[in-house]
Image (cartoon, grey):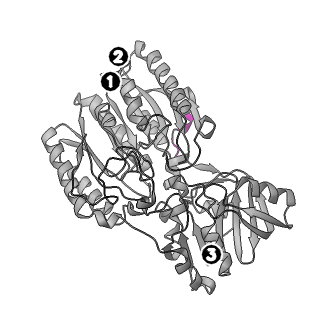
Amino acid sequence: MNKRILIAGLFHETHTFLDGTTGLADFHILRGEELLRCEGDSSPLGGALACAREFGWEVLPVADYRAQPSATVEDAVVAAFWSDLERGVRSHLPAGVDAIYLVLHGAMASQSIGDVEGDLLSRLREIPGAEALPAFGVFDLHANFTPLMVRHSDCLVGYRENPHTDAREAACIAARLLQRCLTTGKRPTQAGLVTNIIWPPTGTGTGNDPMKTLEAMAREMETQPHLWSVSVVAGFAFADTEMTGLSFVVSGTDAKLQQQCLQKLQDKSWEVRELGSVSEPPVAEIVPPFASPPAGVTVLVEPSDNIGGGAPGDGTGLLRALIEWEVPNCAVCIADPAAVVQARMAGIGSRVTLSIGGKGSRLDAGPVVIEVEVVSLSDGRFELEDKQSHLASMCGDRFDMGACAVVRHAGITILLTRIKTPPFDLGQWRSQGIEPTKLSVIGVKAAIAHRRAYDPIAARMLWVDTPGPCSSNLKSLPYSHVRRPVYPLDTLTPHPINL
């Protein structure tokens, strides 16, 4: 008899320091059979569904809620998801459910719940008949893992790469481990440890230390037969929650060995902690030399307006510098629905004065008012060129930037979008008739995840500091809920928290 597996997903990386909230209208929601449309696409859900077919599971699809990183989630979103999940679980239990598989992010916070995933898992276990079911799944490397998440699941597998080129594969690893549980009758337990370290996103790339060394240790640990999964969880620094920061999660059948692994990872992380605490030079120190650009493409990275970290994507710091220093043959992308409307009203070939950007964060200097030429207009839809990119882990195979306008001011090409678009795929530019390899300078609103797309075309890549909500200087953020003391906010000695 085929195993009956209930599948659901909840995906949001919550930046609690942003103004405003994220409501139901901001989520893309699939319910019931709609989830099955994702089978075979590049998302983690698509990977889980493909594995389900391979293993002959009878999939019981419930609901999948996902939104781009953004401000604190409204409680109504959590209530709606829980209503769908509870109803789905209760409706399927009478006919029998063999396991639960969840596609999560792991860093979701709502108006009244700092640990949304842990809270929902604990509620799930309170449903009669669901308390003893194997609960497996996948989660983002930038989760903030909590005691409730450890206690109320059996094996959650984190992404191993940043940029998240392996999100789909991580989902398949989790599915294969669930199949192992179902076929062998062996069921793992989880153990976790939260360090007293917080690293900004710019310090969590897995191609460099400290994450490179920690991930290598985790993969070596997984070769031991009693360890099913070892996850290095970098954490999401822009969430002001108790357990924000670096943690480790080990699933297996040898509790003593699991604790030994957690301690080894903790010891190494403390040894290399300073490598993850990065900072960027002021933009005014970096941009002036590019008034006469050297050969090749220069990528200027603006992590303070990191769209993948929840920033509004309309910061003007880098744009102002490019204008001031008259940098030629350069391009930036700004999310600004109002400017798109004005450009579309003016029409292609027109010259119009636009108020661009500076509307989404109180930290920004405000809009830049400039005269531009409207070069092109589009619906903003594009197919991802790289189906293993960080963007694919969020949206699958396609992305919709909303209505777009390409405008030009002096030597600067500005792609205006209605929907903020993480700069993780070069199809964003090429779909608008812009060939990125022919530009001298490209401004990118990201931290690390853009590198899979831009490393192959960049002659050089430089990070710059501008005003914005995703600054790598964590001491500038008004934390009030995170555990203290914690590095780098305080001077301290290591005192990890076992989950």
What x and y, as percent, mark residue 481?
Answer: 39, 45
For label 2, the residue is: 129
Please say whether residue 357 is visible from this viewpoint.
yes
For label 3, the residue is: 321
For label 1, the residue is: 133
Query: What amino acid is labelled 2 in the image?
Result: Gly
Quarter where residue 94 is shown: top left
Magenta-colored span:
36-41
| Left or right of residue 12: residue 144 | left
Who's the residue at 59% across and 38% down the image?
27
Who's the residue at 81% across and 57% down the image?
342
Question: Mark 3 or mark 2, which is nearer the start of the sequence?
Answer: 2
Position of residue 261 relative to residue 377, above or below, is: above
What x and y, as percent, mark residue 291?
Answer: 63, 84
Of 289 and 358, nearer the camera is 358
Give the number of callouts. Answer: 3
Which quarter of the rendered picture does the C terminus lie within? top left
